[in-house]
Amino acid sequence: MLVEKQEDSLREGEVFKVLVNRWYQILNTLILSQSISIQELCQKTGFSRHNIKTGIQMLNDQLKGIARIQADLNNYQIVILNQNKFDQIMDGSLKGQSDFNSSTKRIAYVIKSLLEKDYVLIDDLAERTDVSRGTMNKDLRGLRSLLKEYGINLQGTPNKGLQLQGEEFDLRLLMIQHVIDYFPEQFELSDEIEQTLINLCNDLHIEKANYSLLRKSLLVSMHRIKHNAAIQSAIHYYYNRIIDESRLEHFFYEVETEFAFSLSQYEREFIQFPIYINHFSQIEITELDEQRLANIFNQMMAEIQKEYYVEIDQSRLFQELKYHLMMMMNRLLFHIQTTDIFIDEIVNSYPFAYKMAKVALEALGNIVGRVPPETEISYLAIYFELFLQKNLQISKRHVAIVSSASVGIRTLIKQQVRDIIGSDAMIVHFTEEEARRANFDEYYVVFSTIPLEHNVKHTVVIRVTNLFSGNFLKSEWMKLSKSSSVNFSNQLFYFRIINDSLTYKQILEQMVQQLALNGLVDPDFEQRMAEREMLTNSFYQNGVAFPHTVNLNSDKIIVSVATSQEPISLGNEKIQVIILLAIPEAMSDEVETELLALYDFIFRIMGKSLIKQKLLQIKNEQELSRYFQLGGVF
């Protein structure tokens, strides 16, 4: 038992209340970040600085030999010392030891009670959890907020009580993710079925986390079936075909024999969903599956094309992305969040790829009826960035690993790389000595256990640290891209400083008219810009607006920038910089390469206040051109 009574500790219920609520929120936040300040921890968890520091101190006391949260220059990071035991903790093992001093334990009990009975009275719930009616009502308000994520309603009926109303699919997911960990003694499998499940996961090479989820899915499904609750229809947009079904058939035969009832095809499909949420080499895509996936992919890409004028070989991108798209849809459907990448570095390093991914994921979310989590956006951004880099002359789908470690360590790195990138990537290993002489320009990405600086100019480098955490992509993800300067030889720059008291619309009209007077845009450009502004509004962030549309009158990209020291109102935003793009309808490969680099840089301006402030100091077009050429310096 990890949590032992200490002489000067708080009473047991208080300790577990902190651990179950604050503990997991702090840890989940740390896992998603390579390094995070206490201010960011407070913001993301909603806890005070005092509670954060107290929680971290308690965590380090309780998790000796398993994990350690350490501070470095006021930033916190987690170091995993024993991966197996840490996995058990993160799988919820401490939740089962908590009591009703924990609001999350009470909410879990309420959900379980509502799922096992038609109606439950608030007074009965308060009595059984030993809290006041007021406290229980507060818990129920929190529960209602949680239920919205699953499309479930908590309905009250006079003289009867409370009742959950929702689809059986969503009710089971709620139970898997918010109930079962708190009552492990009430959800158990026989030794025979446990072993059968372990054998299945070993045969299919299923990860530990997915094994745990598969076990919970089986337990909850058996529990619900015993309470006469069945899944009676197919799950839309769910992909679950396996090349060799014989192992699954044997598994379900053993389950049906143990529980003495038959499972419908719909029940089987639900139970096995944890197999299909991460990269899985044995999945099968039929011709019909591929057509459906392609249709969804095309809808996602159509939304990107509405926002950005960039040529992409969509058929080739689909072939590279289809397996990830399938697993990603499954994760969205089943409310599974990935924790394999760190968000902030992706946003900062690959702003254009991140924007593309965000637009695409919003479209996918609308299709499947889910809100995509931030981690999925970042995960998809990696695929977009790799594909864009490949289009920008990185021609071979090779991945390099630089390490002088043992064969076992290299094998572990390779396995984790394949889990992230996919099994079709060709992985080439370099020792430290070989790396000094190697040219990495032809590689998609380099994973290295040592610093690489002297011979990496055009390739993304991931610094592999803390390997045994199972989350080594949270180490250093650096983009040493193309070089710090960009050759914008196919662009024309125009600049003005706004001193008049004009509206955003008036300024934009004047910028467009200036281009028209110089004969740079076609006669309908102004109308297209006005229609686009009415339809979608400009992108704006950090005081920067980004209106853009296609131009039929030039084969060059025209960049017109207006700046103002006094903020200009645009809806609820205050704008100081307007960057107007007139984009050629037809582009050569060279122009398109520059456009991608320009998109990236504009989004850096929108994301970095320091770069924007330098732009506000510019006084003429010569300085503006130099500013763009040198990546924010003039």
Image (cartoon, rainbow, N blue to C red):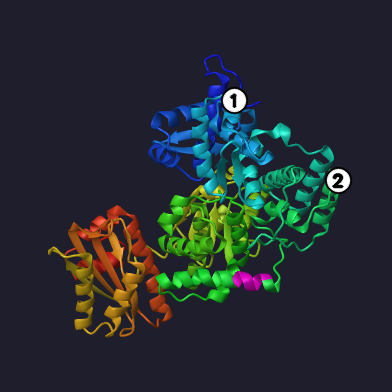
> Could you tell me the amino acid type at mark 1?
Glu
SS of the residue at dot 1? helix
- What quarter of the picture does the N terminus occupy? top right
In the image, residue 312 lies in the stretch drawn in magenta: no
Mark 1: give few (<14), some (14-19) or many (20+) Cα within 10 Å: few
The span shown in magenta is: 289-294
Q: Position of residue 583 (x, y in %)?
A: 34, 77
**In this orientation, which residue lies closer to the viewer: 73 or 146?**
146
Residue 395, visible in the rendered structure: no
Tell which tag, 1 or 2, sits nearer the viewer.
1
User: 574 above or below 79?
Assistant: below
Residue 404 at what x, y percent from top left?
A: 60, 50
Quick one: which residue is furthest to the top in this view? 7
Q: Residue furthest front?
A: 159
Which residue bears the numbered disc 2? 260
> Based on the displayed image, in which of its 4 quarters is residue 74 positioned?
top left
| Marks 1 & 2, CB-CB < 8 Å contact | no
Classify 475 as above or below 61.
below
Residue at label 1?
Answer: 127
